[in-house]
Amino acid sequence: MNIAILGAGIAGLSSAITFKKAGFDVEVYERHAGPCEIVAGIVCWPNAAFVLH
Ligand SMILES: Cc1cc2nc3c(=O)[nH]c(=O)nc-3n(C[C@H](O)[C@H](O)[C@H](O)COP(=O)(O)OP(=O)(O)OC[C@H]3O[C@@H](n4cnc5c(N)ncnc54)[C@H](O)[C@@H]3O)c2cc1C
């Protein structure tokens, strides 16, 4: 089965990785050509830090 994902944010990318690992063919479509600057800091909340760790 082929899966198309619209948006390469954290939800789209993590979904794509999960579907790929499960054996699906995945295409991610992102409207921006590359990463965009938003001039903001990053806060890594405890649950996210737990997953990254
Ligand atoms: C200024 C700011 C600061 C933030 N700081 C933090 C922080 O420090 N820590 C934290 O945990 N969270 C933070 N957040 C929240 C966090 O960014 C979001 O919760 C998270 O990015 C949501 O991920 P998402 O993949 O659902 O959506 P998004 O990250 O919004 O990704 C959606 C993607 O889909 C693309 N897209 C949309 N429509 C289409 C289309 N029709 N076709 C193709 N592509 C499309 C968009 O270009 C975008 O790249 C912040 C948010 C903002 C706005």
Image (cartoon, rainbow, N blue to C red):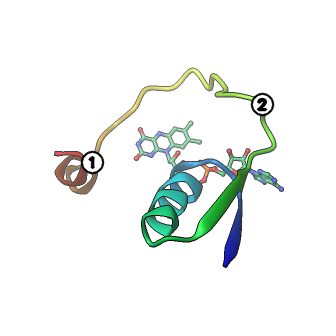
Q: Is residue 1 left or right of residue 30?
A: left
Asked if the beta carbon under badge 1 is closer than 8 A to the nearest atom of ligand 1, the reply is: yes
Quadrant occupied by the C terminus:
top left
Q: How many marks?
A: 2
> Which dot marks residue 23?
none
Of residue 36 and residue 2, the one placed in the foreground of this image is 2
Asked if the beta carbon under badge 2 is closer than 8 A to the nearest atom of ligand 1, the reply is: no
Against 13, is 44 above or below? above
Which residue sits at x=47%, y=57%? 17
- Of callouts 2 and 1, the N-terminal one: 2
Which residue matches tag 2? Answer: 33
Residue type highlighted by circle 2: Ala
Of residue 39 and residue 36, the one placed in the foreground of this image is 36
Element assignment for label 2 = loop
Instruction: Give the percent coordinates (x, y) of residue 34.
Output: 70, 28
Q: Nearer the viewer, mark 2 or mark 1?
A: 2
Q: Is residue 50 left or right of residue 45?
A: left
Would you identify the image quadrant in which residue 6 lies? bottom right
Q: Is residue 21 left or right of residue 2?
A: left
Which residue sits at x=62%, y=26%? 38
Residue type highlighted by circle 1: Trp
